Image: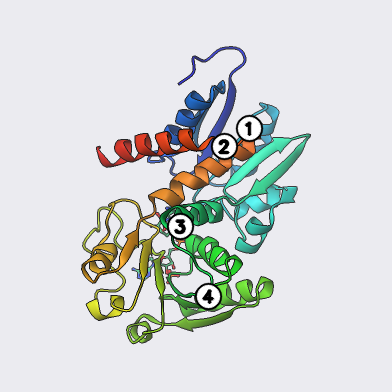
Amino acid sequence: MNSINGKTKTLGLIGNPVEHTMSPFIQNLFAEHMGINMVYVPFHVEKGRLEGAIIGAKALSLIGNNITVPYKVDVLSFIDVLDQRAKIIGAANTLKYSDDQVFGYNTDAAGFLTSCQNEGVFFEDKVVCILGAGGAAKAISVVCAEQKAKKLIIVNRTLDKAEALKNTIQQYFNIEIEVQDYAEVLKLKEANICIQTTSIGMYPNIKETPIGESTFFRNLEWAIDAIYNPSETRFLSLARENGVKTLNGLGMLYYQAVKAFEIWHDVIIPQPIIEKCFKLFNDYIYSR
Ligand code: NAP
């Protein structure tokens, strides 16, 4: 990390809890490699104190904040200018303070897209099955629709939430969307890509998977999991064992941080630095 002095700028993550966040590691790594005099820290904000935290952040001349659970939706009330993806998703994870205004962004979508493009996952004309209808599913659905997927199949335990997501996406994009339950989706043969966005299978519940039937995976080209811990979820190992290409959520997490850093500092991180920092982050997270 740069040595802290009178010119050091502050940024940080607002959430509750924030103790397990990877964002300080990634952001301070970028700062070091880009020669930017800043420090990024976690801010634990108690329920009911979000507005105070943002007023305080502006008063203290912070450059910006990341916003995480449970404030990604509530924070919209304090944003003056919202980017289009955050508007559609209905949640923001990045704030930038400038000229007495709060700018809000959702960089999860950009993170997911870059991670997929880097691995050669393309959505145009593909049938994409999305498991889950929460925050991650919203960001991912927007990307699939923007990238002109042929059809989305949204599968969720709570069907109302899947219907609501379908309606939101169809307000903005001309795309066919079907809602299914987990029993129905097992018969699915037409999907090219399946994206797992639920919290099922996340550490420490690593033996769990929303879909355990091998036959489901056989016609897929790609299986993607938003989870990055463990590096290979049960969902991804089943896919791999059935000859499907797999991608975990580490790239999504990393590239949403890249995008946030670029917004805050109005820079483009050069590709060699992006690659070097990704390797350092990958080693850090999977060697602990
Ligand atoms: P969320 O908004 O709370 O949504 C959770 C989703 O999981 C909902 O669709 C929920 O279904 C489903 N779910 C949870 N437990 C379930 C169960 N036992 N059976 C069936 N469905 C269940 O959470 P989120 O923010 O979308 O995060 C979801 C996952 O994505 C987490 O593992 C998170 O770590 C990961 N994520 C990763 C990144 C990244 O950068 N890689 C970014 C965001 C999130 P119901 O609607 O029926 O409750």
Q: Earlier in the sequence, mark 4 or mark 1?
A: 4
Q: Secondary structure at mark 4?
A: loop
User: CB of mark 3 within 8 Å of CB of mark 2?
Assistant: no
Q: Which residue is mark 2?
A: 261
User: CB of mark 4 within 8 Å of CB of mark 1?
Assistant: no
**Residue ranking furthest to the right:** 99
Q: Quadrant of the N terminus?
A: top left
Q: CA separation, marks 2 and 1?
A: 6 Å
Q: Quadrant of the C terminus?
A: top left
**Residue 9 in the image: x percent, y percent?**
60, 23
Which image quadrant for residue 98? top right
Which residue is found at the position 56% from the left and 23% from the top?
Answer: 36
- Choose mark 3 or mark 2, whichever is in front: 3
Which residue is found at the position 63% from the left and 32% from the top?
Answer: 265
- Quadrant of picture, ligand 1: bottom left
Three-letter amino acid code at the position of disc 4: Asp
Q: Which residue is mark 4?
A: 125
**Residue 145 in the image: x percent, y percent?**
58, 69
Q: Which residue is mark 3?
A: 116
Q: Secondary structure at mark 3?
A: helix
